[in-house]
Amino acid sequence: MSLRHAVLGLIAELEGASGYDLLKLFDLSLANVWTATQSQIYGELGRLAADGLIRVAAEGPRGRKEYAITEAGRAEMRRWLTETRPRYLRRDEPLLRVFFLGQVGADTAAELLDADSAGIDGLLDELVALDERIPWKEDDLSFYGGLVIEYGKRFMEMRRDWARWARGEVEARAAGD
Amino acid sequence: MSLRHAVLGLIAELEGASGYDLLKLFDLSLANVWTATQSQIYGELGRLAADGLIRVAAEGPRGRKEYAITEAGRAEMRRWLTETRPRYLRRDEPLLRVFFLGQVGADTAAELLDADSAGIDGLLDELVALDERIPWKEDDLSFYGGLVIEYGKRFMEMRRDWARWARGEVEARAAGD
DNA sequence: TTAACCATGTAAATCGTTACATGATTCA
DNA sequence: TGAATCATGTAACGATTTACATGGTTAA
C-alpha cells in the first residue's frame, strides 16, 4: 500500500494541502519515485479520512478541502517507515523490449536503443530543470528531497550510458563480430 | 499490456514452453525486468490462445500444455517492438521512504539507508550468481539477455553507491552540518 | 511411501488507468 | 465574457496480488 503512504506522507509534510495540491505535488516532488493519477488521489483521501488517519481541517472556495494528519496518521507513517520492509519490484518496459530485440533486425535494434537513450536524456533534462525550479531550504523535506533528486540524476546518467554502450555492442556484432 | 508481450516473447524464443516453464523462466531471465505471478501467467496464456497469438502445440504428462507462437503472434511481437513507444514508469518503494525520512530521527534514517544498501548488495550477489549459472551461447537471446544482465549490474552498483553516499550525508548533517 | 517437484486452474480483493461529469473562480 | 485554472468526484475497465484448490510423477 505505497500510494496510501505517499499521500499520507505528503499531508504530514504539508499540513493544509488539498487533493488538488497533492496532485501537483506528485508531479513536482515524487515524479521520479511514485506516480499517481487524480482519481487515485481523491479515492485515497476519502479512505484515509474514513480510517481516521487524516481529517478535513478546513474547507475553502470551490469545494476545496484542506487535510491535516491526525495522531493516528503520524503513528501509521512511523510504523510504515520503521516496521515494514520495502519491496524491490522491478518493472521496466523499455528494458523488456531489449530482451526480445532478437525478434527484429540489428538495424531496428540499434534504432530502438538510440530512441531509448534519447528518451532518457529528455527525462534527465526535465529533472535538472525541476531541480532548478525547487526553492531549496534547510528543512528535512528539502534535505531528503535533495537526496532523491540526486538519485534520479545518477539513475538517468547510468541508464543513458548503458543504452549507448548497448547500442555500440549491437553495431559491433552486426559488423561481423 | 507488457505482461502479455513478455509471455508472448518468451514463447517466441522458446517454442514448446509450458506455463510452468514460463514461470521459472520469469525468475531466471526476466527477474530484473518484469515480474509475474503464476496466476497471471496462466491467465495470460489462456487469453493469448483465445486471441490466436499462440496455440497448444502438444500436451504432455500431468496436463502439461506446450505452447507455440502463431504467425499472428510473431506479427504482434514485431508490431509491439517497432510501432509502440515504451513508457518510463517510475515506482520505487524504498526511495519513496527516503523522501519521508524527515518523519523519523536521523539515527533511524541512517539505519534504513544501511538496510537499503545491504538489500541491494544481496540483489547484486543474486544477479552475479545468476549470470554464472546461465549457459551463455552465441544466439540472439544470449546476446540481448547479456545486455540486460549488464544493465542489472550497473543499476545495482549505482543504487548501492548512492545509498552509501546518502547515508554519509545523513550522518554529516546529524553531526552538526 | 513420502517428500519434492511438476502442473494447471479459479476466486476475491486491491490497485491503477482512462474517461466522463460537473461546476466555481480568477484574470485578461 | 470567455479562457484558464481550481476543484472534486464517479464509472468502467484492466492489471496485479494473494489465497485457495487439485492432482500427477519421480526419485530417494
Image (spheres, coloured by chain):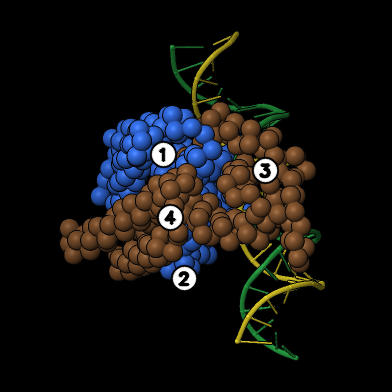
Chain colours: A brown, B blue, C yellow, D green
Is residue A63 positioned above or below A140 on the image?
A: below
- The reply to whether callout 1 and callout 4 are in contact (CB within 8 Å) is no
**Which residue type carries mark 1?**
Leu
Q: Are marks 1 and 4 on the same chain?
A: no
Cβ atoms at labels 2 and 4 below 8 Å apart: no
Which numbered marker is on residue A136? 4
The three-letter amino acid code for the residue at tag 2 is Glu
Tell me, yes or no, whether dots 4 and 3 are on the same chain: yes
Asked if labels 2 and 4 share a chain, the reply is no
Q: Residue B173's image quarter?
A: top left
Q: Which residue in the rendered view is the most extreme toward the front?
A: B176
Q: Secondary structure at mark 2?
A: helix
- In three-dimensional space, the C-alpha distance between marks 4 and 3, rounded to whole angstroms, equals 24 Å
Q: At label 4, which amino acid type do we have?
A: Trp
Binning the other alpha carbons within 10 Å of mark 1 as few (below 14), some (14 to 19) or many (20 upward) gives some
**Apparent side of residue A4 relative to residue A160 in the rendered image (left or right):** right
Tag 3 residue: A69
Vertical side of A56 occupied by B119: above or below:
above
Chain of residue at mark 3: A
- Residue B53, above or below B64: below
Looking at the rendered structure, the secondary structure element under dot 4 is loop
Residue B10 position in % (x across, y down): 45, 50
In whole angstroms, how far apart are the C-alphas of marks 2 and 4? 41 Å
Specify few, some or many for label 4: CA neighbours under 10 Å numbering under 14, 14-19, or 20 or more: few
Q: Secondary structure at mark 3?
A: strand
What whole-number distance in Å separates the C-alpha atoms at marks 2 and 1? Answer: 28 Å
Q: Judge if badges 2 and 3 mark residues of a common chain.
A: no
- Give the amino acid type for the residue marked by disc 3 in the picture: Ile
Quick check: do tags 2 and 1 share a chain? yes
Q: Quadrant of the N terminus of chain B?
A: bottom right
